[in-house]
């Protein structure tokens, strides 16, 4: 079935963008709590396993029958957007790539999506959109400046961070192109989470086992990651992709570093610098510049199909 352009109220995008950036940056909070006494791969395993198991009965009982093709497609995207994206950065940090550099590279996803939009989606970005994207990059650089360092990790670990970011961007535009985001969100998210859980289980087992630490901080962290950073965040992300261009949706990710620092300041008493606030202001302006005017139009691809 061919998709038709969707008109939304002008306040829908600001509300969805706000929800997306807050939930996207919230993973820092859950990881901070859950990984205090646990390996990061173990945290990611329990995050994806619990998310998938909670969604499983709804995925089986509510919505259209899931075809074999749709199942395979969602498993591939789960391996890309969850296992390779999240796991790649976790592994890089484990190899002593500085966290500031990892955070910077991970939040350049919008830049990669902008570059891929033309060849994959046939969506040519305007000069206004490229300007807003550039401002977003500048804002991220300003925010990350104090935490940037090259470190002494092996070369492959640095390559892994770039590859993880690229995989996430490519998976986003390919899903948009193929129309696979039109499967009911609870079904696609269930398949993706369970696929990633299987892969993270192998990594966690290799690192020491699958048994979680029985403490309140780990439980709180996993609950936060499941409800807020997975259900709310990925749900908002895929819902936004149905209504707006991939470049517009991804542009709000530029706000993730400064908002993450606001999380750290409000919950953990971490200091804020003037550079962080300046970077936040520049990034906010860049996101607004990208999302205003013609940039807010939904890219309509006649060849997209409803799958599932």
Image (cartoon, helix red, strand yellow):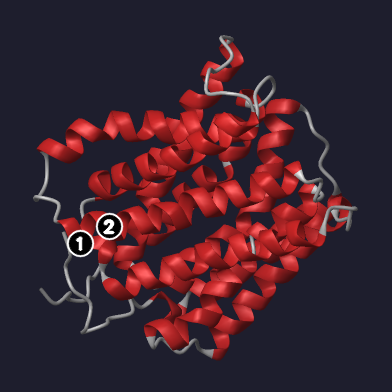
Q: CA distance from mark 1 to mark 2?
A: 5 Å
Q: Residue at x 62, y 52 (%)?
A: 88
**Residue 197 relative to residue 53: left or right:** right
Relative to 63, is 125 above or below? below
Secondary element type, mark 1 = helix
Residue in view at x 21 percent, y 59 percent: 70
Residue 275 appears at what percent x and percent y? Answer: 84, 55
Residue bearing mark 1 = 69
Residue 285 visible in the picture: yes
8 up-or-down from 231: above or below: below
Residue 58 falls in image quadrant = top left
Q: Which numbered dot is residue 137? A: none
Work out whether residue 43 or residue 276 is closer to the camera in this orientation and state it. Answer: 43
| Place of residue 1 in the rendered image (x, y in percent of width and height, measured from the top left) | 10, 73
Relative height, residue 242 to residue 60 (above, below): below
Q: Nearer the viewer, residue 96 or 101?
A: 96
> Outermost residue, front direction?
206
Is the residue marked by circle 1 packed among few (<14), some (14-19), or many (20+) residues within 10 Å? few
Q: Determine the residue positioned at 61% across, 75% down.
A: 133
- Count how many numbered circles sit on residues in the image: 2
Q: Work out whether residue 9 can be spotted.
A: no
Pointers 1 and 2 in contact (C-beta within 8 Å)? yes
- Residue 138 pos. (x, y %): 74, 70
Q: Horizontal placement of 299 versus 281: left or right?
A: left
The C terminus, quarter of image: bottom left
Looking at the picture, tell me which residue is in the foreground, 160 or 241: 160
As helix, strand or loop, the secondary structure at mark 2 comes to helix
User: Horizontally, is 226 left or right of 92 in the view?
Assistant: left
Point out which mark residue 72 bears: 2
């Amino acid at each position: 079935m061919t998709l038709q352009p969707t008109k939304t109220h002008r306040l829908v995008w600001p509300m969805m963008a706000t929800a997306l950036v807050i939930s996207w940056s919230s993973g820092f909070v859950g990881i901070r709590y859950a990984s205090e006494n646990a390996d990061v791969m173990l945290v990611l395993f329990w995050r994806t396993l619990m998310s998938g198991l909670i969604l499983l009965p709804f995925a089986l009982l509510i919505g259209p029958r899931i075809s074999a093709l749709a199942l395979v497609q969602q498993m591939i995207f789960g391996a890309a957007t969850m296992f390779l994206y999240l796991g790649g950065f976790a592994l890089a940090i484990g190899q002593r790539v500085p966290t500031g550099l990892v955070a910077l590279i991970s939040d350049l996803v919008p830049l990669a999506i902008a570059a891929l939009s033309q060849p994959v989606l046939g969506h040519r970005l305007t000069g206004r959109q490229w300007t807003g994207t550039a401002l977003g990059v500048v804002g991220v650089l300003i925010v990350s400046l104090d935490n940037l360092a090259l470190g002494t990790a092996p070369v492959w670990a640095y390559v892994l961070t770039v590859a993880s970011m690229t995989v996430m961007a490519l998976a986003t535009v390919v899903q948009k192109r193929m129309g696979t985001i039109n499967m009911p969100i609870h079904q696609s998210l269930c398949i993706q989470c369970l696929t990633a859980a299987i892969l993270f289980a192998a990594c966690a087992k290799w690192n020491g086992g699958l048994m979680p630490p029985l403490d309140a901080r780990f439980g709180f962290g996993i609950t936060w990651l499941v409800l807020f950073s997975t259900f709310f965040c990925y749900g908002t992300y895929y819902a936004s992709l149905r209504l707006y261009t991939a470049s517009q949706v991804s542009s709000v990710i530029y706000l993730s570093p400064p908002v993450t620092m606001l999380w750290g300041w409000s919950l953990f008493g971490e200091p804020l610098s003037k550079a962080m606030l300046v970077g936040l202001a520049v990034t906010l302006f860049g996101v607004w510049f990208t999302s205003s005017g013609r940039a807010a139009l939904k890219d309509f691809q006649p060849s997209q199909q409803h799958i599932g």
